[in-house]
Image (cartoon, rainbow, N blue to C red):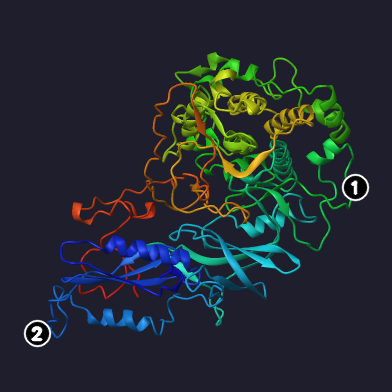
Amino acid sequence: MPYHRVETIVEAKPILKEGGPQCATYLYRVQQARPDRPGIYGLYAKPGFFQILYSSPVGVRASTRSDWTKKPDLGESGLEQPECQLDLGLLCAYVYSLYDPPDHLFLYDRTITWSEASNHLFGPPTWNIKAGGHLYSGAMIAFIGYAWGRRTTVFRVARDGLPPVVIKEYYLDSERRYEESDLLAQIHAPGFAHGVVRVVSAEDVQLGDERTIIFQEPGSQATKFKRRLVLADTGLDLEQARSVNDLLKTFYDVLEVHRTIARERRVLHRDMSIFNILMYPEHAQCTGAPWQDFPALIDDVLGEHAPEANAERTPRCLLIDFDHSARLADDEVASQQVLRHRTGTPVYIARAVAARSVPEASYATSSTAFINATMPLLSDEAKRLYVQMYGEDRYNRYNDVEPTCHGGTPPANARILRGRPRVPVQFYHRWEYDAESVFWTMYSVLLRVLPEGIKDEDEATHTALVEHWAKLNDHTIPGDASSMKSDSRVELLDRYDDQFIAPFLPVMHDVGYLLFDIALQVTPSYALMNPLPPYEDHLHEAMQRLILEYLVAHRDRDIPLKPGVLRTAGCDVEEGGREHGMFGSGLKKSTAQSDSKKGTAQSVPKESTMPSDSRGTGSKRPLEDKHKPRMTKKRRIQTERVSQPELPDDRRPREWDPPVLRGEWTWPAERTAEQPPSVAGAGDESAT
């Protein structure tokens, strides 16, 4: 029975087996498959007792156990005694709610309904969604997020004769500082920005009686309300690239778009990753004029013609998911205050952001690192193209004059005392940290794409691939501020060029050397410089120059790729999947964010590595990932950790339970006479 046909879950267990976490698991899955069910009830029953469970975006809660054998005993006072726990009224209310849902709860969202699959009785449904005064029919789910949290769901809607649109809905925390649609409106006013997704409509989801769908956080005044956006533009995952040059042109435009909207529209993305960068964008026709003085993009530079004022321009990239973006204040001090919160995706987050601190003494703070990172100078042809589009002033503005590095003055090693700067440097999210995230995204994609005509690789190359990928993919975000030395990716930066390119196929060695040169620019801790680099987009400039140099040199030597096929790197398949060709990645990122009031650290089983091969050095290994489709190992690590109660052995979640359940199942305290029958967890005051 497919989950979208399920209305409730009943989990019955014998005496010696526990089923509460299992019932919660099924409720979690139903809510992922049923975006029309904001809340859902479940029943857990055993010969000794039963419990009612209620799952919603704020988590799962359970009633107190109701003992089948203990009949109500009113006693002399005529009131129910605390030790008498049979509550048939609660059981009847649960059954009745299936036929007449209570008004004070949001069990159904009638603005979204599912339709039968046309080709199979149990096939995936399509969805009919009301948004912005329109009815969008035939929507297909492209992404499903965590059911207990923001619960983001993304739909792709194909339209006859028109470009597709994307509908995104999620449950927004009322205490959140910024909202995505507001930031996108700021970016696209007064003229729409090239390379950034556009909003058709944005609204709080309301039922027929104009009630907004709202959930109360247990023990808090904060609420979550359902939000729905219709987005006009779509694109493909980076792993669908048809050539290496296509990928590098995309990243060049990503850096140009990112630095432009930060500088001109005062919005910093703060979560650049493989999930939020699309290529081969497909744009809908929108009213309004484009941003007239938008800087030249890579096709303008290589095409050697300046863009016309009102000409339709197609960037190589599309930036999406501004959920964790920040509005920059005009005052520098105020902006720094806004940017003190940590947010990002584990594999791609900048090292300093993950540590939430200025790094300790390391190669990143050494004089050698800064010497190796002086602003790159372009060769004759690349410089000619650059100056033709951007002008001599922009080129000279970022160039270094000894002893500067990116225009700033590197710290002397003597200033580092026992691993820390003498003058404390406060952490805030700098522009260069987003540029570093773009680098990690470049590295992760270019490391694993598979060129056409390649069927196997040397064992040494594959071994290096598995090692490098593990150091990148195993990175997690620590719960507290920590040393950058604990970052598993640091070792990738602290390598000689021959070691750095070891995991790249021979045909990709020039790409490996490009990434090595960019890594030299990314490595230093620029926050320790005094004075700092005068331009906050200095790292963007350095990375773009190196990409441009490569593209000019390889104009006629592009490397065709197999779209959607990746080199095997010893990765296990995890929950979720990718819908290639949809709106971004089907398996969503895990974003660590400290703007929220509190979070829960959730563990994920360690990724297994490729078993050792016994064929010896020089043997060949097949390259293609058996695309089922490809899924990326991710971790959902929240910034603030909350200690969890230790469960008895017989009450621990089973190993097959989803990661979101591990260590989170709360067993409610016994109900007292003052507590009416409720669907509430231990310590919760809310009732149903």
Quadrant (top left/top right/bottom left/bottom right) for the C terminus: bottom left
Other residues around mark 2 within 10 Å, as few (<14) / some (14–19) / many (≥20): few
Q: Which of the 4 image quadrants contains residue 65?
A: bottom left
Left/right of residue 111 with respect to residue 518 in the rendered view: left
The amino acid type, in three-letter code, at marker 2 is Glu
Q: Which label number is shown at residue 308?
A: 1
Helix, strand, or loop for circle 1?
Answer: loop
> Does residue 93 appear in the picture of this structure?
yes
Q: Is residue 71 left or right of residue 374?
A: left
Q: Relative to residue 609, is residue 128 drawn left or right?
A: right
* Direction left: furthest residue: 76
- Place of residue 235 in the rendered image (x, y in percent of width and height, measured from the top left): 67, 53
In which quadrant of the rendered image does the N terminus lie? bottom left
Query: Which labelled disc corresponds to residue 106?
Result: none
| Residue placed most toward the observer, 509 or 277 | 509
Q: Residue at x 19, y 71 (%)?
A: 49
Mark yes or no: residue 684 visible: no
Q: Nearer the viewer, mark 1 or mark 2?
A: 1
Per the model, the C-alpha gap separating discs 1 and 2 is 90 Å
- The residue tagged 2 is 76
Quarter-of-image position of residue 88:
bottom left
Q: Which of 322 and 612 lies nearest the eye of the viewer?
A: 612
- The residue located at (23%, 74%) in the rendering is 674
Reading the chain from its start, which is encountered first: label 1 or label 2? 2
Mark 2: which secondary structure? loop
Q: Horizontal and vertical percent for residue 405?
A: 68, 21
Label 1 is placed on what type of residue? Answer: Glu
- Callout 1 environment at 10 Å: few (<14), some (14 to 19), or many (20+)? few
